[in-house]
Amino acid sequence: MTARVLLVDDDEQMRSSTAQALELAGFAVEPLASGEEALALAGPGFAGAVVSDIRMPGMDGMTLLGRLGEVDPDIPVILVTGHAEVPLAVEAIRGGAYDFIEKPFVVQELATVIRRAIDHRALVLENRRLRAVAGKRDDVEVRLPGRTQVMVELRYRLRAIGASDADALIIGPTGVGKEVAARTLHDISTRAGRPFIAINCAALPEALIESELFGHEAGAFPGALRPRFGKFEHARGGTVLLDEIGSMPLELQAKLLRVLQERVITRLGSNDPVPLDVRFIAVSKVDLADLVARGAFREDLYWRLNVAVLHVPPLSARREDIPLLFLQLLRESAARHNIAEREAPPAFLSGLAAREWPGNVRELRNLAERFVLGLEGAEIGPAQGARLADRVAAFERSLIAGAIAAHGGRLRAVYETLGISRKTLYEKMQKYGLDRRLIVEAADEES
């Protein structure tokens, strides 16, 4: 596969000529005029390198380096500098830059540095994949299981963000486990021993919302007979989860922005600021950018939250995980009810992966509960409403994925069970993008 390079330079002529030269050297180059464009393309799974001019209007190379470090500190960033900027570039290397090259440069020299950077990046990604597939499961993987790439990347970002003290934004549809991710962030942080306060912004009574969050002094309003800590103050030293942040009234959003920026609160009925040492984790099932466009969410608050972002994927984006995830939920449900675990046939597991799950993990967990209690049979049909060809393809893909999971990755047992040749199985795995190493838990984890 052609090595990918994001080339960031605000000088159009320089950007164009350098891109052409690097393409002739064998790279797949994406010329970009700003650092913001590079941030949109470089995620934790980015398999390439970033080359950026150090001096640009708006987001310069140093700022881009820092922002990319928040996304994934192992993304190689090569800075292009002028002679007078060399000391700055050396300082950037101490701060995480892969290398720098001084203007005017020979393209062959830049190409050599890029190749080294991409080789290094490939090793980093391969090591992550091997650890995720074959390594020992830690507490983060127990809480957010899955061997698909989207889950590997989610856990990597969660560990990276959890180790910092940065506020975070978690986005994902209903039932995917956003609060589980938030609680995990808290538990792997230095604040783990302090309070974790969950606030449902959609459920707070409008008349009492400020008092609930900021607290009040005696006499602040009728019925306020004594001083009271608000939830923000109660969480001092810990973490505040703002669930359904998009439902927060606009007036309160302005006050929250001030809290995020200044880390102080003022109780109702008081003029004395109270220092606040908390970490905020905001959660939303809708894209806050859409709410901003509709005028339902403050743009300045959106950008204040949109720094350390976690996207929790729906089950439709990780179908290969469904059979093993269901088995884990079965074990948990059986232990919770103190009853024997009920065996799920391979055909049943395959059928699970073929269905649509609008309720995501929550809906799958409910099914596991019913299955353990004997309220659900061992037959389950394919999803309804799709085109016949799509349904057939989805069912075939899920059947193969479920068989691989059910037989512990032993492909001979899979193709014999399915009644197909080894060659046909390999072709279909390639067709559907199935990798047994991302579907199957290592055998010793089950022993």
Image (cartoon, grey):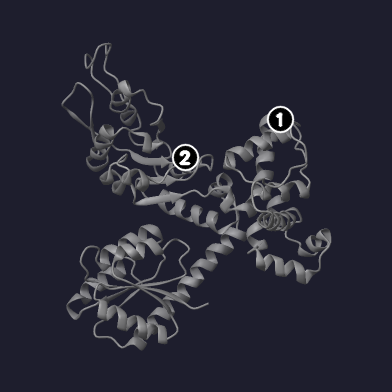
Most foreground residue, 213 or 133 = 213
Residue 398 image offset from top left, x and y in percent: 69, 54
Would you identify the image quadrant in which residue 228 lies?
top left
User: Considering only vertical position in the picture, is 194 above or below 33?
Assistant: above
Label 1 sits on a secondary structure element that is loop
Residue at point 23%, 19% (across, down): 217
Q: Which residue is disc 2 drawn over?
A: 183
Residue 163 shows in the view: no
SS at circle 2: helix
Q: Position of residue 129 (x, y in %)?
A: 56, 63
Residue identified by numbered label 1: 338
Inspect the image, locate mark 1, and give the three-letter code of the amino acid beneath it: Asn
User: Residue 39 lies in what quarter of the image?
Assistant: bottom left
| Closest to the observer, 421 or 223 | 421
The mark nearer the N terminus, 2 or 1, is 2
- Say which residue appears at 75% left-offset and 53% top-offset: 406
How far apart marks 2 and 1 lie (CA) works out to 26 Å
